[in-house]
Image (cartoon, rainbow, N blue to C red):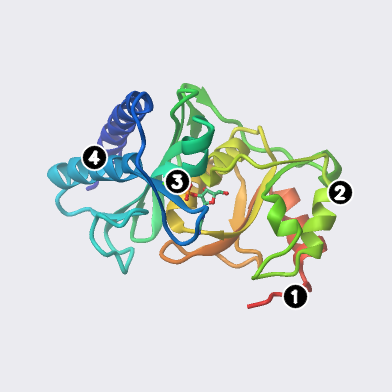
């Protein structure tokens, strides 16, 4: 039988070690490249951190699979078995420009079911972690179940560009949402957006395009506090392809999906 407690112990150890390495590297010069567009950044530290995890996982759990953002693991085309879904640095733009608000994000799945979620806010030394069915924590603090919140009192994470224009979706419902909520925030790391929902710092997160490594760990945390997540059509998220996301407090997500997004024009 799979020893999830032992996997969790090692994963936490490696996340902390990787965090220390990232911190140390920030004293040195970064090598920065762009990927899909001029604002999609990757650094030598993203790649080195991913390699660090790949080496640790492969030498300890030879039968586990690794789906990493920088693609240095194997090509993963199925979620059969145990799959580590890794973003070595989520929020690379923050890492490069702001030197804070980036995270290591690791979701460990078994046959498509999220079993362990780890999101490590390196600079604040805040480790959000969960094992399925055993509650979510921020460091040693157990995170309580989320309570319903009215939309007028909600803090919602959203990138302002989605409320201006989008290649995928009509922007008007997002502009209305931005007007109606108490406040909007853009952290710039999807993993931290989800960790903030799990810890009650934020009530929802809406975004039109994320990859599985951006949200895999966060979904494990969200399950443990009674939060919900889907794509913007209210359908289940998949963990091998890109997805839009509405995540957060159940009451807010239902309202966003039903009163704001439903019936709006999807451009794709
Ligand atoms: P990254 O820093 O690991 O690239 C920024 O709002 C959030 O969106 C970050 O979590 C960022 O992850 C993610 N992101 C940025 N560009 C993306 C893209 N082209 N596809 C999917 N997610 C992206
Ligand atoms: Ca990344």
Mark 1 surroundings: few (<14), some (14-19) or many (≥20) residues within 10 A: few
Location of mark 1 (residue): 265
Is the C-beta of the residue carrying label 1 under 8 Å from the nearest atom of ligand 1?
Answer: no
Front label number (3 vs 1): 1
Tell me the quarter of the picture where residue 69 sits. Answer: bottom left
Q: Earlier in the sequence, mark 4 or mark 3?
A: 4
Instruction: Give the Cα distance between marks 2 and 4.
Output: 44 Å
Mark 2 or 4, closer to the camera: 4
Is label 2 in a helix, a strand or a loop? helix
Residue 122 located left or right of residue 156: left
Image quadrant where residue 18 sits? top left
**Badge nearest the viewer, 2 or 3:** 2
- Residue beneath disc 3: 217
Q: How many marks?
A: 4
| 3D distance between C-alphas at marks 4 and 3 | 18 Å
Assign the C terminus to one quadrant of the image: bottom right
Question: In the rendered structure, which disc, 1 or 4, sits on the residue that comes first in sequence?
Answer: 4
Q: Residue at x 60, y 63 (%)?
A: 231
Q: Percent x, y for residue 97?
A: 52, 36
């Amino acid at each position: 039988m799979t020893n999830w407690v032992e996997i969790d112990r090692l994963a936490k150890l490696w996340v902390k070690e990787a965090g220390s390495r990232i911190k140390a590297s920030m004293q040195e010069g970064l090598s920065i490249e762009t990927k899909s567009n001029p604002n999609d950044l990757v650094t030598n530290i993203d790649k080195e951190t991913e390699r660090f995890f790949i080496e640790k996982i492969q030498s300890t759990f030879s039968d586990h699979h690794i789906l990493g953002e920088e693609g240095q693991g194997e090509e993963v085309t199925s979620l059969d078995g145990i799959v580590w879904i890794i973003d070595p640095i989520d929020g690379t733009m923050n890492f490069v420009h702001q030197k804070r608000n980036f995270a290591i994000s690791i979701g460990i799945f078994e046959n498509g079911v999220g079993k362990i979620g780890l999101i490590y806010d390196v600079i604040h030394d805040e480790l959000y972690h969960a094992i399925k069915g055993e509650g979510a924590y921020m460091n040693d603090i157990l995170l309580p179940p989320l309570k319903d919140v009215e939309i007028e009192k909600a803090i919602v994470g959203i990138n302002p560009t989605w409320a201006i224009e989008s290649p995928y979706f009509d922007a008007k419902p997002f502009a209305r949402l931005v007007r109606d909520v108490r406040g909007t925030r853009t952290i710039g790391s999807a993993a931290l957006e989800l960790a903030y929902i799990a810890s009650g710092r934020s009530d929802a997160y809406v975004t039109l395009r994320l990859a599985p490594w951006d949200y895999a760990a966060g979904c494990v945390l969200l399950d443990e506090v009674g939060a919900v997540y889907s794509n913007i059509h209210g359908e289940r998220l998949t963990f091998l392809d890109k997805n839009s996301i509405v995540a957060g407090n159940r009451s807010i997500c239902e309202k966003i999906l039903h009163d704001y997004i439903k019936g709006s024009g999807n451009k794709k």
